[in-house]
Amino acid sequence: MNVLLFGIAKDIVGKSQLQFSEAEKTPETVLELKEMISVSFPEFRKLSSLAVAVNSEYAEDNVSLSRNDEIAIIPPVSGG
Amino acid sequence: MNVLLFGIAKDIVGKSQLQFSEAEKTPETVLELKEMISVSFPEFRKLSSLAVAVNSEYAEDNVSLSRNDEIAIIPPVSGG
Amino acid sequence: MDKKIIEIVDHIDTSQVFSELSDSKSGGICVFVGTVREFTQGEEVISLEFETYKKMALKEMNKIAITAIDKWQLNKVIIRHAVGVKKVEAPVVIVGASSAHRDACFEACRYLIDTLKETVPIWKKEYFENKTVWVSAHP
Amino acid sequence: MDKKIIEIVDHIDTSQVFSELSDSKSGGICVFVGTVREFTQGEEVISLEFETYKKMALKEMNKIAITAIDKWQLNKVIIRHAVGVKKVEAPVVIVGASSAHRDACFEACRYLIDTLKETVPIWKKEYFENKTVWVSAHP
C-alpha cells in the first residue's frame, strides 16, 4: 500500500510517498491510517486539520482502504 | 443661453442644443428650465426622470442659471 | 503613479486590465466587463450605441473611483467606458479594483459598476430589426 | 463548445480571459485574479510556491464549476490555477464567470474562489527572508 504525501505532510515524513510493505500491518480504514501516521509522526497532530483522499476523492473516516486504492494524505489546503 | 441635449432629449427636441436668444425670456432656475422645456416638448413629461447639469454637475431644482453656465438636460442614464 | 484610470474610449481592449491593476500590495484583483447581449427580453439586438456627455461623465466616474478607493482602501481602480456603436459580444464597459484582500476588491468592483449605471451621463440606444429604444428612458 | 475551462498550469496568462469567457448570451463577465502580495502580516514575502495533487485538484475544480454553472445558469466558467514558484505581483489563480446579468456572474465568481480555497488540494508555501511557512497548516 502506497500513500501519497503533499505539502507539509511530505515535509513531516521526509518523502513524497509512504509505503506499507506486504509484511506490515496496513490500515483498514481512513481513520486507522490517520491514527497510524499520527503515532509514527506526531507532527501530524499539530495540523489544523487532516484529510485523506481515496481514489482522488475526499474520504470519510469510516471508508475502507484496499491495496489497489490510490490513497493520499491531504493536509490543510491553501490554494488561491 | 445654450442648453446641451443628449440621448432621448436630443431626439425629442430634434437637435443637440436648445438656444434661448437674447430677446427671449430665459429660465432663472433649474426647475424653471424643466418646466419650460416640458411645455414646449411634452414628450419630456413621459420620461422616467429628468435631471439638469450646471457646469457639468447635477443641479437641484432651486439652483440659479446664468447665461455663462454650461447647462445640460440629463435624461435617464443607461451606461454600462 | 496615480491609483485611478478613468477613461471614455472608442474601443475597449480587455487584454491589459490585469496589468493595469497589478500592484505589489495587492493579493486580489476583481474586474467586471459589461458586454453586448444578443437578446434582451426575448428580442434580438443588432447593436448598441453609446453616447455621452463626456466632460461630466469623466467627473462622475472620477467621484466614483475616489469614493471606492477611500472606502475599500484600494491600491488601484479602473473605470473605462466605450462610446459609439457596439456589436454583440463587444465589451462596452470595464471596471476593476485591486486590493490587499479579496473582500475589498469584490465589493468595490460591484460598487463601481452599480454606481456608474446610476449616475454617469452615458446613454444606450438598442437597435432592433425594426426599431430603436433609448434604454431606461421611459417607465 | 464546453462551458468550462479547468486547468492547472505553470504560468497564467491573464490577457485572454475575457475572450475565453465571451458569449453572445452574456451581458456580464466577472473575473477574479489572485496575485502574490509583497507583505503578509507585516513580513516581506520573497516568493510563493504552489504544489498540487493534480488529478484530485482537477476533479474538485470541475465539481465547483459544475455547481456554479447549475446554480447561476452561467454561460461560461473558468478556473485556472498556477503551480511552481511565483514572485510578487504574479497571478496565481484566475476564476471567472459569464452570465446574462451581472448579479449572477459576481456571485458565481465569489463562490468559485471561496470554494477553491476550501476544497481544492493545492498547497502554498511562503518564502520569507529567513524561513518558509506552509500556509494554513497550523492553527
Image: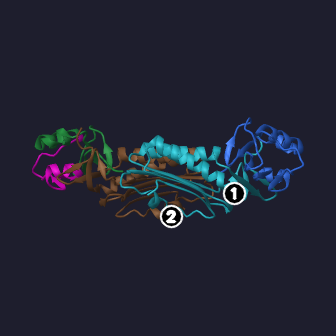
Chain colours: A blue, B green, C brown, D cyan
Which residue: 74% across, 50% down? Answer: A68
Amino acid at the residue labelled 1: Phe
Sequence-first tag of 1 and 2: 2
Q: Is residue B16 left or right of residue C23?
A: left
Q: Which residue is mark 2?
A: D15
| Position above or below: D90 against B65 | below
Helix, strand or loop at mark 1: strand
Between the C-alphas of marks 1 and 2, the distance is 22 Å
Q: Quadrant of the C terminus of chain C?
A: top left
Helix, strand or loop at mark 2: helix
Q: Is residue D85 magenta?
A: no
Q: Which residue is mark 1?
A: D50
Q: Find residue A38 and report its horizontal and vertical position in percent.
A: 85, 41
Q: Nearer the viewer, residue D111 or D64?
A: D64
Q: Which mark is residue C86?
A: none
Q: From which residue to which does the magenta span run?
A: B1-30
